[in-house]
Amino acid sequence: MAALSPFSLILFSLILFSLYCTSVVAIPFETVQDAVEILADSGFLSMSLTFELVGQTLIPNSSYGTIFSPPDAAFIHSGQPSIDLLQYHVVPLTISVESLRTLPYGTKIPTLYQNHSLIVTTSASDQQISLNNVKINELSIFYDGSLVIFGIDNFFDPSFKISSHSLLSDSPNNDIHCTVPYFHDPALDPDSFAVASYNIRYKGYSVMASFLELQLPLSVDQRKLTIFAPVDEAMKDYTGVSGRYSAVFLRHVLPCRFTWSDLVKLDNGAILQTLLSGFTINVTRSGDTVLLNGFSVNFPDLYYRDWLVVHGISQILTLPGEQEPTPDSQAEFNDNFKRSGPGSTEF
């Protein structure tokens, strides 16, 4: 294949733009321009030129994405990339280096190239993170809370495969009661909830950040928690959600800790019990995408500590027909904590 000249790169980028022009603009123009400038300044000129023309339409409607950018040398060596190959370098969720590091070997990460996923090839003994055996630069080139760009050593190969490795067991679907025994860490920062709230607020989850401050008083004994935080846009309209505001919060909280690595290993159809009595979360898959009651996690490991994990999601969690939860209150929230006991699953 012929080498990629600057002129052919620009011409090809224009072709890509015309093919993508019917897509919905998903990320702000200012974000695209900032990313374009930083890519160019960081030595990724080829990707900068391409992203300048197709960036606003390359990211899906959720406005969340992670882009893996090959260096200029890879463009020159491989020639003009196809549209499918470009899509294969875009993941429709925001992934941090920490999240990539926690994923076990063989985990599949969905991309915009339909039915093609990236595969984690980092083993426990590896110091360098890799996908499809291509090294990932752990220092992100660009990050603005919804869009992340990482540099990589070469183009990913869509035909890459590893030896048989199943993420799903043959065991029956699990109804997981996430109750764990009390624990107390004297070294735990008394302002941990406030710190968690601050960290998710500026990333676009200010409504759930406020719930976190109000619904989790510091007087409550700390334990392991998982919170699924809908983005602010999804929280503006409560008309489709039954119950009072506390029900909105409690249905998104699990009394145990599930990192993204834990979620991707759950059986298809696993049922998670929330702090709202009678409300459960059904974990399913669409290809390699993990769904919670039909909605995907768009910002895994948004915030996490040893006792708390917050995942960003695009919608308020509901069930088919909007399951009617039992009456709830702050007292019920505290009762759920008090009823937690030993002998249950802990993550």
Image: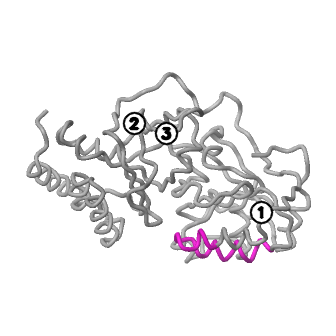
Label whose residue precedes the other's in the sequence (3 or 1): 3
Of marks 3 and 1, the one in the foreground = 3
**Looking at the rendering, in which quadrant would you find the N terminus?**
top left
**Residue 282 spot, x, y in % from top left:** 66, 49
Numbered tag placed on residue 128 in the rendering = 3
Residue that label 1 marks: 276
Magenta extent:
198-217
**Is 233 rendered above or below residue 153?**
below
Residue drawn at (25%, 40%), measured in percent from left and top? 74
Q: Toward the viewer: 225 or 142?
A: 142
Q: Nearer the viewer, residue 237 or 205?
A: 205
Q: Main secondary structure of the magenta part?
A: helix
- Residue 129 in view here: yes
Mark 2, mark 1: which one is toward the viewer? 2
Residue at position x 19%, y 36% from top? Answer: 77
What kind of element bears circle 2?
strand
**To which residue does mark 2 refer?**
134
Instruction: Check disc 2 and give the amino acid type.
Output: Val
Q: Residue at x 32, y 73 (%)?
A: 30
> What crowding class fits label 1: few (fewer than 14 Cα within 10 Å), some (14-19), or many (20 or more)?
many
Q: Does residue 69 sit above or below 170 in this rendering?
A: below
Front: mark 3 or 2: 3
Q: Is 129 on the left-hand or right-hand side of 70?
A: right
Which amino acid type corresponds to the residue marked 3 in the rendered image? Gln
Asked which quadrant contains residue 339, the reply is bottom right
Residue at disc 1, secondary structure: loop
Label whose residue precedes the other's in the sequence (2 or 1): 2
Residue placed most toward the observer, 238 or 43: 43
Q: Per the image, is 63 magenta?
A: no
